[in-house]
Image: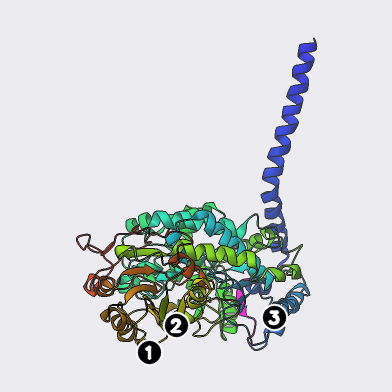
Amino acid sequence: MRNNCFTYIICCFLLIHFSCTTQVKVSKDEIIEQKVDSLLKLMTLEEKIGQMSQIRHFEANVDEDVSAKFIGSIIHTQGPNPGETALDWQNRFIVLQKKALSTRLGIPMLFAVDAVHGQNTFNGATIFPHNIGLGATQNEKLVEEIAKITAIESQATGFNWVFSPCVAIPFNEKWGRVYEAFSESTELTEKLTKASIKGHQGNLEDSNTVLATAKHFIGDGATDFGIEGGETSLSAKEINQILLAPYKVAVKENVGAIMASFNTVSGISMHANKALITDTLKVGLNFKGIVVSDWQGYSRFGKNDIINAGVDVVMAVDGNLVGFQEGLREGVKDSTVSMVRIDDAVKRILRQKYRLGLFENPFPDPSLIAKIGSKEHRAVAKQAVRESLVLLKNKNNVLPLSKETKKIVVVGEHANNSGLQSGGWTINWQGSYENYKGATTILDGIKKLSKGEVVYDQEASQNHFDADIAIIVVGETPYAEFMGDIGHESNQLQLTLSETHQKYIKTYQEKGVKTVVVLVSGRPLVVTDQIEKSDAFVAAWLLGSEGDGVAEVLFGASNFLGKLPHSWPKSVEDFKGKYGPNFWDKSIEPLFPIGFGLKH
Ligand code: BGC
């Protein structure tokens, strides 16, 4: 009897326990779906089209448009206006958010920013190495931590959505966005994509997490000859095997959004590619988030074709809003766009807004402002710099340098300019050529650590040939997107170092001064000759705000931990085909294989 009674009590307990836990688990998502459905039922077509519209916050009439046109999200790309503080930004977005909340249904807006290596649009934020440098660290914990900090600093400046991470697999170093991607290795990209999304999104409800965006779907980095927005002529099988894997990971991590790419696949614009966006991504991978267009995607890539292909939010920037809203309205009227498609798009947008907790907490948190560029955040950025440096040569153990070295000459404008050391997407879209707030340069770090004399010979013209060591910092000037494509008419970029920078190295090397070359670049360059001529050679990528981290490793505070995230080309000829050596012709030997990196 007692036994029966005991069994009965245990059974009841288990039943209650399991039904409770299952209920809680299922109900969270279910409640969101119910809320989405109920809200959707109340919405007019105008309100639905509004949710699908994204505009810039400084366009003409923005304040009126937000409420009159039911705008769903705001995008920010560069800034700030001089003198504006984080609180000014928050206040500006609060004004806009209140306008959205004052509409009939009061649906809050998303505020999106291109925070691709920290909240890089805010002067004074912590700026991390670009993704190529994070690829060199191979450190997923660190990448997660960096994404967490980026989310905090983005929220602190008023944003709840970031257009990051770029999960491209670059096939050709001529592409101007190689540095935005982690690596040419699919496996490494998968690992770091997962970490990045986890870090940005956390549980999404906290006021210091943001929606992440995996971009650019799909084939952005694999275009023929590395042309931004060009043709990706891979087979469906290759796309599946090499390029889709990071998106699978992103979807598994519940990424909030995925951005469509500028390139074409089999001649079809990716924005209008229904087979890949709807069939592969939304149906095949069961992606429940938002597909967002890229810049002016609607007018550039087929208007309602992109909506029918599965794009949910349109970057209707720079005067594109009226054309988009009218065009879509017409499409619904003449039944070339179905209401089912519109409803699917709006459901996806509302779902993410509920996941973020935006209906309960639509405003940014002013208490986060104190964290922007904080000591703790910079310490993580510096760790990333230290772990990202790849040592390619170290003849006679010239590194680590002794702090007691009598005289060090530091050469090159990149040694003393935090703008140059950070690359594109820093303060401005195309980057900056000036020092920015809170950053240290490589020269700052060398001066701080050295106990001997340190002289700066910016252009290798002062003949400090009595120096014991020359630290020569050379590299690329900042660029972003197509402006960084090698071979593009807009620039003079090349796969080799400029004549001037080659001369910096030669000047000191020919006089017998021991030379340590530090290369600041967004991709591996052909520097076979310069490596040959130098005593030590370090690939430092685009390192962000903590330049003194480079000096610390040169002086041996820690060992070199970075491993090449790309195979390193030995000659310009290696790129005469469609792609780089690793993808095009396996018989071409790179100078260094992917994964290479010495220790001192
Ligand atoms: C880029 C995207 C970026 C967007 C918004 C586009 O030109 O391709 O990566 O997120 O602009 O600034």
- Identify the residue under disc 3: 85
Pick the residue in front: 174 or 569. 569
Label annotation for residue 371: none
**Circle 3: element type:** loop
Residue type pointed to by label 2: Val
Residue 191 left/right relative to 32: left
The location of residue 119, given as percent across then percent down, is 59, 72
Image quadrant where one finds the C terminus: bottom left
How far apart marks 3 and 2 lie (CA) works out to: 36 Å
- Kindly identify the residue that appears in the image at 33 percent across and 74 percent down: 515
- Identify the residue under disc 2: 455
- Identify the residue under disc 1: 462
Q: Sequence order check: which comes first, mark 1 or mark 2? A: 2
Highlighted magenta segment, given as a residue range: 51-59
**Circle 1: element type:** loop
Residue type pointed to by label 3: Thr
Query: Are the two marked residues, 3 and 2, in contact with CB atoms closer than 8 angstroms?
Result: no
Residue type pointed to by label 1: Gln
Q: Is residue 479 visible?
A: no
Disc 1 within 8 angstroms of ligand 1 (CB): no
Pick the residue in front: 340 or 62. 62
Q: Which of labels 3 and 1 is toward the front? A: 1
**Circle 2: element type:** strand
